Amino acid sequence: MSRKILVADDEQHLLNTVRAYLEEAGMHVYTARDGREALFTFRHEKPDLVILDVMMPEMDGWEAARMIRRESDVPILFLTARVDDVDKITGLEIGADEYITKPFSPRVLLAQVRAVLRRAYGDLAAESTIWRVGELELNAETRQVRLSGQRIDLTPSEFDLLAVLIQRPGRVFTRMELLERIQGEAFAGYERTIDVHVKNLRAKIEADPREPLYIETVYGVGYRMGTSSDE
C-alpha cells in the first residue's frame, strides 16, 4: 500500500530532494511551501504522515501542527534548523512523533519516516524491500544483491546507485540526480564520479559491460535501468 506523505518546507531544494527520496521508496508525496498551504493540503488529501518545517511563512510549523492535532492523530515529524531543547520539547508537547535537525541526510529522514509509519500503522505500512529486473535482485533491507541467485558484493555507493535505478526501470536519471540520491547532495563538476560507479557496477553485474543489459547509458543525459533485461 502506497502511503501518502505531506512535506511542508519553504526551501524548494529541500522539498525536491525529500520528495525524490520518498517517491523512490514508493510513497505518494504532496508538498507545501508554508503552513497555511500545508493545512489546506492536509485537509483535502488526508495524508498518512505529515513532515513540517518549523520556520515557515504565513503560518509556522508549530501552529500548523496544533491545528492538525485538533482534527487528527496523524503522525507528525518536525524539521528545524534550531537545536534548542526547548524547541524539541515544544514539538513533542504539540504531538510530534519525531524531530529532525537540519542539515540531515535524506536517507536518515527516509528511515525515520518508515519507522514512524511502522509504529503508526503496523503491517499496513510495510513497503516492498525487494526489487527484481531480469535475473538481478536487490534487497534493500539486507542490502544484498543477487544475480541469477549468486550474491554480488557491492560497495555502499554502488549499492545505493543500483537501488535508485532498479526501483524505477526505464526512468532516466541525470548524473546530478544520481549523485544527489546516493550522497544527499550534488556539486557541479563531481557528477562524473557517477560514471566511475557505473563502470565498476557494470563489471560486476553485466555479462558484457560493453553491451549492458541492465544499466543503460542515455547519451547526453545519464543512465537508466533497462526494462527488457529478462528477454
Image (tube, rainbow, N blue to C red):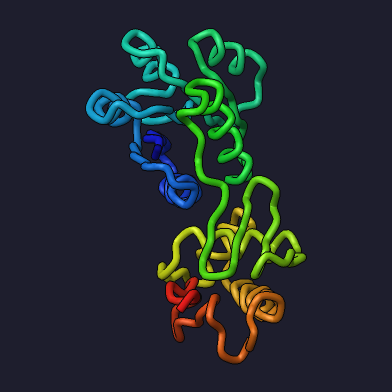
Q: Tell me if residue 43 comes above or below residue 4 in the rendering.
A: above
Give the image quarter of residue 36: top left
Q: Tell me if residue 156 comes above or below residue 89 in the rendering.
A: below
Residue 182 relative to residue 117: left or right: right
Residue 129: where, in percent of width, then height?
57, 47
Quarter of the figure with the C terminus: bottom left
Give the image quarter of residue 15: top left
Q: Is residue 78 visible?
A: no
Residue 133: where, in percent of width, then height?
51, 66
Residue 218 relative to residue 80: left or right: left
Q: Residue at x 48, y 10 (%)?
A: 94
Residue 128 relative to residue 154: left or right: left
Which residue occupies the extreme left position in the image? 44
Q: Tell me if residue 161 comes above or below residue 11 in the rendering.
A: below
Which residue occupies the extreme bottom position in the image? 210
Q: Residue at x 54, y 27 (%)?
A: 118
Q: How many numbered circles does the render carry?
A: 0
Residue 143 relative to residue 106: left or right: right
